[in-house]
Amino acid sequence: MKALCYTRPLEIGELEASLDMHEVDVPEPAQGQLLVRMRATSINIDDIHIAEGTFFGGLGKSRASAEKPVTPGVDVAGIVEKVGSGATVFQVGDAVVGILGPKAGRGAWAEYCCLSAAMAVKKPEGYSFGEAAACAVAGKTAANAVGSAALQPGQTAVVVGASGGIGSTIVQILACGGVRVTGVCSGRNAALVGSLGAETIVDYTLGPFGEQLAGQKFDVVIDCVGGRDTERQALLVLKKTGRFVTLVGPHRFVGETRIGMPGILGMIGYVVRRVMLSKLSGPRYILAGVGNSLEPMEKLVLNNNIRASIDREVPFERDAVREGVAHVRSHRASGKVVIKIARD
Ligand SMILES: NC(=O)c1ccc[n+]([C@@H]2O[C@H](COP(=O)([O-])OP(=O)(O)OC[C@H]3O[C@@H](n4cnc5c(N)ncnc54)[C@H](OP(=O)(O)O)[C@@H]3O)[C@@H](O)[C@H]2O)c1
């Protein structure tokens, strides 16, 4: 099969130039796995961080060699080709969407991959494979964040980074649940975020969002950008009983740099302190997103017919994917960058 691979450990910024199309063996599904003939996948910012050894600021290393090329990618949308023993919920020919995890390995930017049946759900018929792939990690993370926000209909939320893959999905889930959403994005994405259900738009390029919203108080701020400045702005507009739900933490777009073990420990210490202290004095500080189930995503995203916003679909060709990676890395994508591996 064809797979996009890199063949040596990478430094920051090297993934684009290192990706090449290789011929590799089709993998065999192990117990509990499905062999999926891929139709579409997507590029997550964390695919880049994992490849370059900067995930969560540098936990883990970039590994690859000519003998052991590595294929990035975790979002899976395709057709079940083979069912491993014990994965009997699915049948050959089922259209599925799922996420590759540490056990199954990475490798979704390929014509086939092995997906754990526990991290797969049937693709709803109304979704194209590209739409389904865009909803995998983004949908799971968005659904988990919304779960942590624990909002009721009529309550108010600010979504920071509302035009990204995850933010665009969060805005829709909240609006669908009757939450009144304020989206923070740049002016160029204002129409998009409004069309997804945000009642009010704050253009962060005109000034810090907390200052622009001065005098108003919200039940929740969901942060898809990160950084202490985002948290400071959130605290200006949160009710004492409110929740600051961050997908990133105190380092903006953590994963772009290697912050080293002292930096990582400092970040963990900060989050633990904030979580504990905020329980006493509010607003609550919540680091969200992680979770090993697709159930919330299926319930809140797929069953509500919600689609992550798609910035572009690129063909499964080396140069097109290299450009897609560069676009995701720039943090300017208005939603997901999808790789179309084969026709629907
Ligand atoms: N906790 C978890 O489990 C988990 C899982 C997956 C991802 N993440 C993290 O979540 C973050 C968001 O991921 P994503 O894939 O949604 O990101 P993304 O798609 O790369 O977000 C890009 C969007 O962010 C907007 N943006 C950039 N800077 C901004 C700012 N200062 N204020 C408001 N909007 C800004 C951009 O809009 P403009 O061009 O208009 O500025 C663009 O539309 C990443 O840092 C990722 O590492 C966490």
Image: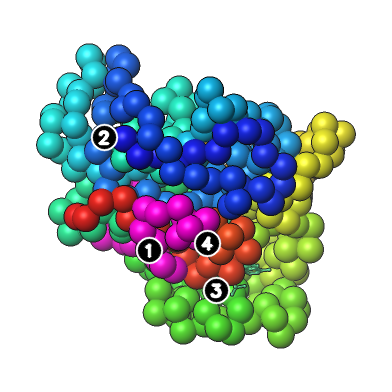
Label 2 and label 4: CA atoms lie apart by 25 Å
Between 141 and 127, the residue placed more toward the observer is 127
First along the sequence among labels 4 and 3: 3
Q: Quadrant of ligand 1?
A: bottom right
Position of residue 243 measured from the top left corner of the image (x, y, whole percent): 62, 55
Circles 2 and 1 in contact, beta carbons < 8 Å: no
The answer to whether the residue labelled 2 contacts the one labelled 3, judged by CB atoms less than 8 Å apart, is: no
Q: Give the distance between the C-alpha atoms of the residues marked 2 and 3, in whole angstroms.
A: 36 Å
Q: Is residue 47 magenta?
A: no
Residue 132 pos. (x, y %): 30, 53
Q: CA distance from mark 2 to mark 1?
A: 20 Å
Dot 1 surroundings within 10 Å: few (below 14), some, or many (20 or more)? Answer: many
The spot of residue 303 in percent (x, y) is: 25, 53
2 and 4 marks in contact (CB < 8 Å): no
User: Which residue does the numbered mark 4 point to in the structure image?
Assistant: 323
Q: Earlier in the sequence, mark 2 or mark 3?
A: 2
Q: In screen coordinates, is 262 left or right of 319?
A: right
**In this rendering, which labeled residue sits more in front, label 2 or label 4?**
4
What residue would you read off at disc 1?
313
3D distance between C-alphas at marks 3 and 1: 24 Å
Q: Which residues are magenta?
A: 297-324
Q: Residues within 10 Å of mark 4 (few under 14, many from 20)?
A: some
Q: CA distance from mark 4 to mark 3?
A: 28 Å
Magenta run includes residue 310: yes
In the picture of the structure, the residue carrying the numbered disc 3 is: 183
Question: Which label's residue is closer to the chain start, 2 or 4?
Answer: 2
Q: Residues within 10 Å of mark 2 (few under 14, many from 20)?
A: many
On the image, which quarter does residue 314 sit in?
Answer: bottom left
On screen, residue 24 above or below 154:
above
Give the residue at x 48% y 58%: 319
